[in-house]
Image (tube, grey):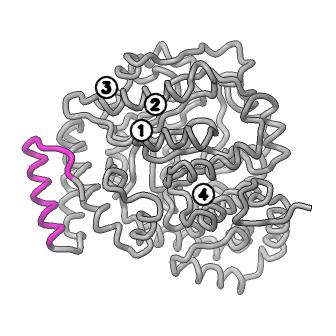
Amino acid sequence: MINYDIKSGKAAEFIHDGEICQTLEYAAAHSNDLPLIEQILQKAAEGRGLDHREAAVLVECRSEQMWERIFSLARELKQRIYGNRIVMFAPLYLSNYCVNGCTYCPYHATNRTIPRRKLTQEEIRQEVIALQDMGHKRLALETGEHPTQSPIEYLLESIDTIYSIHHRNGAIRRVNVNIAATTVENYSLLRDAGIGTYILFEETYHRATYERLHPTGPKSDWAYHTEAMDRAMEGGIDDVGIGALFGLTDYRYDLVGLLMHAEHLEARYGVGPHTISVPRIRPADDIDTADFPHAVSDEAFRRLVAVLRLAVPYTGMIVSTRESQLSREQVLEVGVSQLSGGSRTSVGGYADQVAASHSEQFDISDHRTLEEIVAWLLDLGYIPSFCTACYREGRTGDRFMSLAKRGLIGNCCAPNALMTLKEYLEDYASPHTIELGKKMIAEELKNIPSDKVRRITEERLRDIAEGKRDFRF
């Protein structure tokens, strides 16, 4: 008999089906237990987070009045920890060759209609220049799993290429990596290459569903895939990002599994995930979402984001261009802290959008340019941040979380956000966005609590206007 063990290195023990099922039964039985829900909300308000069972109870809550309190508390908690900063990034697809048989992804090995492509180093250079010309400073590398088309050597060479490119005032200052589960040795190589966060989505934590959706290829090994973050940590990567593709099974099950995964990393390694991503199933080349009956409604999506924010208050939450402008606006308010912008989900999609349009991994809902998204965020009262300082200053893993939980990370984040926004305004923005950004910077300078930090920030903003770049606290 398999027992639930939060510190175990075995996937079936820390993502324990029996514990998840019992949690969902408990939550359903207490969905109208207002005193219990009140107690959970009081704990959340203190910024102490929630365990997977407490979060499950909130998701099942039947009281609309309580839901208004959940949303309000999620907004308050996000503002308290993150302020109004929203970190910007873009995905960069290197190759769509893949040996897996994932039934929800058009890159699956038996798809004969999608054009297959792998970027050369010169093509990567052109993609990076196109991204730099938009204003991006942070990328998430994506590639299909293929032993000869995208081995670790190709990825390491590509990372070196990306970091080496300085075009006008552009530079990619942080490369995150979203690749298939690999070995401890390969994770050590990625660490040594200077990556930011290693990202891998579980897709679904429901093992039977996972195995049905991954019938062939290396990814079909549920345990090896699920234990990837343990190997990444053992390989020296202390910033990892987890996620689930909501809609593959009951979102409540995956929400509980996602939080159990976070709890496991915290218990075993002393630090939970740096980010959690919450994509929803989207149509693509030969993928019909009608084949997936567990699609998540906009309202359910908003609720699960709010509950995640209460459960893991110090963890960044990411929403991509899978979501529409309206959906992104709704979840920004209740928990999301990172957004992609101006994204292309095809190989070579930035330098040659037309030629690459038939190789998209999924359909994009938010087609706006980065410039349009920056202006939109400013209009909504958010600071679009291109900051990568913590990674380059060694504030990662438990060091970052320690500062965040003591409320000290804001001494760095707010001025860094303003300085990177100023860089964007100087180098890439339209006159309209420049006016919005100047107003935001002037207002937010007043909110920097330290007189010394505020004075230094003002000096550096003037230096940026004179052509200097890359200041950071």
Say which amino acid is labelled 4: Arg
Residue to which mark 3 is pinned: 129
Residue to which mark 4 is pinned: 302
- First in sequence: mark 1 vs mark 3: 3
Rendered residue at 17%/67% (across/down) = 454
Residue to which mark 2 is pinned: 156
Instruction: Point out which mark residue 193 bears.
Output: 1
Label 3 – label 4 distance at C-alpha: 35 Å
Asked whether the viewer can see residue 20, the reply is yes
Magenta span covers which residues?
Answer: 452-471
Say left or right for 94 vs 108: left
Element at badge 3?
helix
Disc nearest the viewer among 4 and 1: 1
Residue 473 locus on image (x, y percent): 24, 59
Label 1 – label 2 distance at C-alpha: 7 Å
Asked whether the viewer can see residue 330, the reply is no
Say which amino acid is labelled 2: Leu
